[in-house]
Image (cartoon, grey):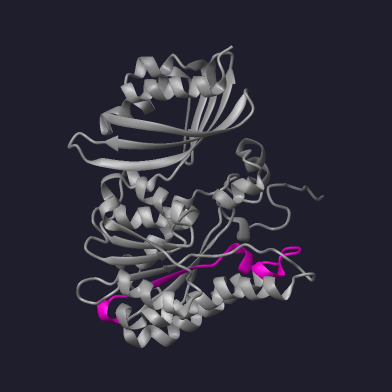
Amino acid sequence: MTSIEEIARAYWRAEESRDVGRILTYFTDDADWSAPGLSARGPAEIGAFYAASAEAFPGLVVTVGRVLGGDDEAAIEWSAVFTDPAGTEVNASGTNIMRRRGDRIASLTVYMDPQPIQPPAGRFAGLHVLVTGAGSGIGAATARRFVEEGATVTGADVNAAGLAATRERLGAGAARFRPVEADITDPEAQRALVSSALGPDGGLDVLVNNAAVFLLAGTDATPEQWSRTLEVNVLAPAQLTAVAADALAASGHGAVVNVASISGHVGQRDRQTYNTAKGAVLALTRCQALDLADRGIRVNSVSPGYIWTEVLDRGAGGDRAAWEPVWGAFCMQRRCGEPGEVAAAIAYLASDDASFVTGNDLLVDGGLASMSPDGQATYEFG
């Protein structure tokens, strides 16, 4: 029998052909196709989706990544370059959850960042952005988002290989991405990093403090765990923002976005280190916003919930198909978020669209914080 990976690769070759009839041969007659906010069932509905996609983007090249899971159900990572009728290339990536019946697809759930396909044109054109932790996850997605919207982005990370991967996925936009291997806890490195991110006029338009460490410990936390967690997650963004303040003010519309976490809003067992640090980021954001307001600098934060980054993937042992329903149950939308969805929120807070927003935190958690402990359950009393 054909393996699920072989089915997936054959399906993507068919999708690259943009031939709807050929694509449909890989689905069962009662197949389900879904994506966040979209669903289709059967040949007519699924075919209509692919026909519209082919019309909007007649060119498509797909690269298949890791295949995680069993042979009847698997999570399959991919990246793609879409080309519209004018020849403009758009990069996208994501993960498909595929379920098979025989040698055909019975169910396909597509998780991708929907924003890069039709981003607001040139919202950050000509601006200069610094993103820390740009070698993976939310940081990498944020760097991509700003590049796709016209910015020149300096991406910092201790992981040089991760930065190289981020740059590679930018396609034609790679020329506007500057990877810098740096330890953001080093004061000297902070000054050098800010200097490398400045525009020709000496200004910096946006700073995204995303870099973090995930040292999760409770009452048994060691002094080293406490020190490292606070140093990277709290002190570094405080110090880097202070170093960048003059350049942010010089831009005339400087914006800082700190990446906090839903963990800063709630208590979680055996996570005193991380949750305390992220709670401190929320307090830091409010204080920075007040201190920098007179200089024309806005400061906000985002608090992601369960976002399928490399960290979550490691926690799931690479088995997204098995673990997403578990973690997704904590969210109103019954799924984990994508890094690109957080990047979209960061881009909004950094943009002039949020010109009267400062000192705020934007939850990007699929409704997690708004649900009671009952969650999705319903109880009748009478």
The answer to whether one can see residue 358 in this image is: no
Front in this rendered view, residue 344 or 5: 5
Residue at figure coordinates x 30%, y 73% from the top left: 204
The answer to whether one can see residue 263 in this image is: yes
Q: Is residue 239 left or right of residue 143?
A: right
Residue at figure coordinates x 26%, y 59% from the top left: 123
Q: Where is residue 165 in the image (x, y as percent from the top left)?
A: 41, 48
Q: Position of residue 286 (x, y in %)?
A: 50, 80
Is 254 placed above or below 211 here?
below
Image quarter of residue 200 = bottom left
Q: In this view, does 269 lie to the left or right of 196?
A: right
- Asked if residue 273 is among those painted magenta in the image, a careful observer would answer yes
- Asked if residue 132 is among those painted magenta in the image, a careful observer would answer no
Q: Position of residue 118 (x, y in %)?
A: 30, 45
Front in this rendered view, residue 137 or 196: 196
Residue that protrudes farthest toward the left in the picture: 86
Front in this rendered view, residue 369 or 105: 105
Front in this rendered view, residue 293 or 230: 230
Residue at figure coordinates x 47%, y 61% from the top left: 133
Residue at figure coordinates x 27%, y 30% from the top left: 59
Image quarter of residue 102 = top right
In which quadrant will I find the N terminus? top right
Q: In this view, does 29 lie to the left or right of 241?
A: right
Q: Is residue 7 left or right of residue 85?
A: right
Q: What stretch is highlighted in magenta?
A: 249-274
Is 289 placed above or below 215 here?
below
Residue that protrudes farthest toward the right in the picture: 382
